[in-house]
Image (cartoon, grey):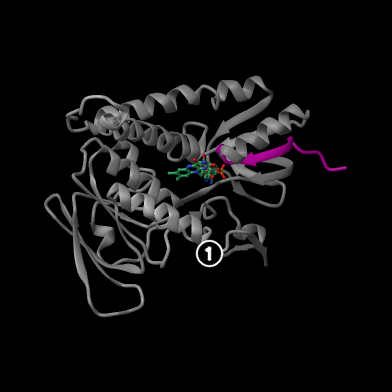
Amino acid sequence: MATFDYDLGIIGGGAAGLTAAAGGAQFGAKTLLIEKSEKLGGDCLHYGCVPSKTLIRTAGIWAVARRAREFGLPDLTLPPVDLGTVMDRVHSVIDKIQQHDSYERFCSIGTEVRFGQPTFVDDHVVELDGTGVSARSWIVATGSSPAVPPVKGLADVPFWTNETVWSQRTFPSRLLVLGGGPIGLELAQAFHRLGSRVTVVEFMDQILGPEDPDIAELLRGRLESEGLKILSSTKAVKAESSGSTIRLTVAPASGGAETQVIEADALLVATGRKPNVAAWGSRRLGLHIRPEVSPLICA
Ligand SMILES: Cc1cc2nc3c(=O)[nH]c(=O)nc-3n(C[C@H](O)[C@H](O)[C@H](O)COP(=O)(O)OP(=O)(O)OC[C@H]3O[C@@H](n4cnc5c(N)ncnc54)[C@H](O)[C@@H]3O)c2cc1C
């Protein structure tokens, strides 16, 4: 019978990989977790759920403070928000939760953790730092990254994604959000509540992508009543910047000729996700991955 270094190998130390690693180790499997970045936790901890829910909480408090009079309190004159201080808090929350997703914690529950970027050599062996590591079974949990649409000029414009927004320190008076899905909308609402004038540009007729139309309509009404501007059925055709101003030319998604130019101080691109499949050697295993579908399709 073939022998392997590990019963279970996991590539990717995000929410999925960590859950699998904890489960594997606790069921007594000899488990190896390999993560390419310096810290465990993946998108959820560093660029997703945790920072966004922290920002939403901060923005929610600011929005309630603005409504002080409704609660029988004197009107409050709120000063401008210092984005650097807001982001410092976001990072302090990440740091706190990092202890639960740490190298030390996972080692203490019996998972071996290594940092690096492995490549499959065959079905059971990956190469890591120049040596082969084998496992009876592997789980690939390498997650996804922001997908940036092929809009003319966009590559030359400084834009944010869910990975870079958390390191911003200058508050944008005007924020343009490309993409009316959950990531774009939650950040749009948070920045609006903190004081930005926010415009969301969405290609589809409804926001929230394939979500139930009634829910999408309800949310849209709510966001618009708060003051967000949402341009649906609208596509971005050209991006430019001069000085600190970003200009996005948009047109009807249906193909109509009339365009308008929206100016902003910052642009957040939240137009979907692409799977992280290039680095670990999916081709060598004979896998073709259709990014628009995500599930693995064997060749
Ligand atoms: C702004 C935002 C808000 C979100 N809010 C929520 C929320 O409120 N609730 C919720 O349930 N979900 C939320 N999500 C979604 C959630 O973050 C993801 O569903 C979750 O992170 C997916 O986990 P994962 O383990 O599949 O991938 P990831 O978290 O992306 O983890 C993948 C890991 O694999 C590593 N990796 C990648 N390639 C390699 C490689 N070649 N070798 C080794 N390691 C590699 C990466 O560095 C990363 O650590 C949000 C996402 C975003 C962007």
Query: Which residue in the structure is indicated by mark 1?
Result: 292
Please identify the quarter of the rendering in which residue 32 is found.
top right
In the image: residue 205, left or right of residue 201: right
Residue located at (69% from left, 52% from top): 122
Please identify the quarter of the rendering in which residue 150 is found.
bottom left
Image quarter hosting the C terminus: bottom right
Examine the rendering and report whether any part of residue 131 can be seen: no
Residue 286 among those drawn in magenta: no
Q: Give the image location of residue 48, x and y in percent.
A: 45, 40
Residue 288 drawn above or below residue 18: below
Please identify the quarter of the rendering in which residue 84 is found.
top left
Label 1 SS? loop
Residue located at (53% from left, 38% from top): 116
The residue sitting at the right extreme is 1
Image quarter hosting the N terminus: top right
In the image: residue 40, left or right of residue 134: left
Q: Amino acid at mark 1?
A: Glu
Residue 7 among those drawn in magenta: yes
Q: Give the image location of residue 192, x and y in percent.
A: 28, 44
Residue 27 drawn above or below residue 9: above
Say few, some or many: other residues with alpha carbon within 10 Å of mark 1 (under 14 / 14 to 19 / 20 or more). few
Q: Give the image location of residue 33, x and y in percent.
A: 62, 35
Image: magenta residue range: 1-14
In the image: residue 162, left or right of residue 249: right
